[in-house]
Image (cartoon, coloured by chain):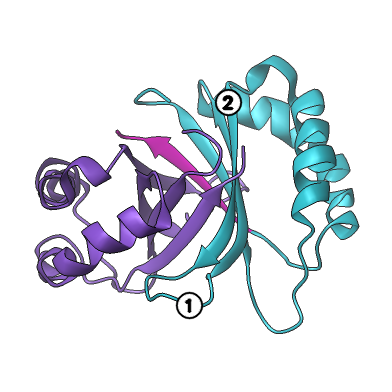
Chain colours: A purple, B cyan
Amino acid sequence: MKQGMIKLSVLYPNGEGTKFDIHYYLNTHIPLVAKLLGDAVKGATVEEGIASVAPNSKAPFAAMGNLYFETLESFQNSFGPNAAEILADLPNFTNIAPTVQVSKVMA
Amino acid sequence: MKQGMIKLSVLYPNGEGTKFDIHYYLNTHIPLVAKLLGDAVKGATVEEGIASVAPNSKAPFAAMGNLYFETLESFQNSFGPNAAEILADLPNFTNIAPTVQVSKVMA
């Protein structure tokens, strides 16, 4: 994605008793979000955590989902009105309260 | 980046008294890492944190740096021997102990 774009990162921290259904997330949740936010979304990526830096160490996050927007305004205007419906889908694939980061793409 | 690739994410959590020099990171640290790891690195991205989900809320992370590799082996073989030199550069731009995540690109 190009410099200056806005990246929304939703990070799902691993912990005791946490569950995350990556198949539901990929096949149902991300398409739901894409449908709700429409043209404001310029790209989406998903990663599944496999480790920390040491081999065989547990990943800090079960998964990360990232959405890209042209501007902060287009993110706020598209996400805000749909936040409740998006959040209501979370219990269908996880019991984790995600960490949400809004970033500017620098490189 | 394409499905199945390995993504190394280095996340710098914001906190009381934390400092992060994004200009040094972009202009000196990332080029150093790219030079050390060489052809194993298939892509690199950097994002600067600007907010959490609520407008005007503090970003959980000051910055995120991401490197992409073809395989877990190519990451381990290139990163391992250079980890000490890479880590030794951190005090030049931050006092944050980063969170390190190794992920598989799913989408």
Left or right for A26, reference B104: left
- The answer to whether residue A60 is visible is no
Image quadrant of residue A9?
Answer: bottom left
Q: Amino acid at mark 1?
A: Asn
Task: Answer whether residue B100 is magenta in the image.
Answer: yes
Q: Which part of the image, by quadrant, shows the C terminus of chain B?
A: top left
Task: Answer whether residue B56 is magenta in the image.
Answer: no
Residue indicated by mark 2: B43
Q: What residue lies at 10% left-to-right and 46% top-to-bottom?
A: A35
Labels 1 & 2 near each other (Cβ < 8 A): no
Give the Cα separation between the discs numbered 1 and 2: 31 Å
Q: What residue lies at 45% left-to-right and 60% top-to-bottom?
A: A102
Residue indicated by mark 1: B56
Q: What residue lies at 41% left-to-right and 36% top-to-bottom?
A: B104
Q: Residues within 10 Å of mark 1 (few under 14, many from 20)?
A: few
Left or right for B78, reference B45: right
Indicate the secondary structure of the residue bearing disc 2: strand
Q: Residues within 10 Å of mark 2 (few under 14, many from 20)?
A: some
